[in-house]
Image (cartoon, helix red, strand yellow):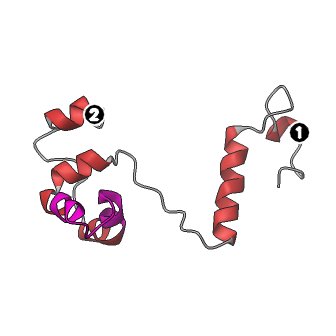
Amino acid sequence: MIMHAPRTAAYAPDFRHVRDGVVSVVMDRFLETYGAPTSAAPQGFTELGYLAANPDVESEVHAGLWDSGYQHYAARGRPEGRPLLPGDGPTARTIKAGAA
């Protein structure tokens, strides 16, 4: 794909480094071709925020039922319409971690 693009479109001004947007497209096509899931977390998703908004999920993660809050979100939270952040605003923990 990079080989078929004009150099000015695919490469940075130094013509040695591929532009970030091109890398993203190539990676997406690679993942689509080889069957890897390409769904990304929604904008604003943070692990701490999701767990703070869903304490039952946090308990399940700590118990080892899920590898992460995101794993739960992708499998069940999104279809259930679970909140990404606590309804009463960010917690001190999420603010301190920069996840708010």
Q: Which picture quadrant has residue 70?
A: bottom left
Query: Is 61 within the magenta?
Result: yes
Residue farthest top in this picture? 14
Foreground pick, 82 / 94: 94
Numbered disc 2: secondary structure: loop
Magenta residues span: 58-74
On screen, residue 91 above or below 1? above
On screen, residue 3 above or below 94? below
Q: Nearer the viewer, mark 2 or mark 1?
A: 2
On screen, residue 74 above or below 51? below
Q: Looking at the picture, how far across and down is residue 1, in whole percent?
A: 82, 55
Query: Is 85 within the magenta?
Result: no
Q: Residue at x 30, y 32 (%)?
A: 98
Q: Is residue 2 left or right of residue 41?
A: right
Q: Residue at x 49, y 62 (%)?
A: 39
Foreground pick, 98 / 24: 98
Location of the C terminus (image quadrant): top left
Q: Main secondary structure of the magenta part?
A: helix
Q: Residue at x 17, y 52 (%)?
A: 53
Q: Looking at the picture, how far across and down is residue 9, in whole percent?
A: 81, 39
Q: Earlier in the sequence, mark 2 or mark 1?
A: 1
Q: Which residue is mark 2?
A: 97
Q: Which residue is mark 1?
A: 7
| Distance in Å between CA atoms under marks 2 and 1 | 41 Å
Three-letter amino acid code at the position of disc 1: Arg
Q: Residue at x 86, y 48 (%)?
A: 5
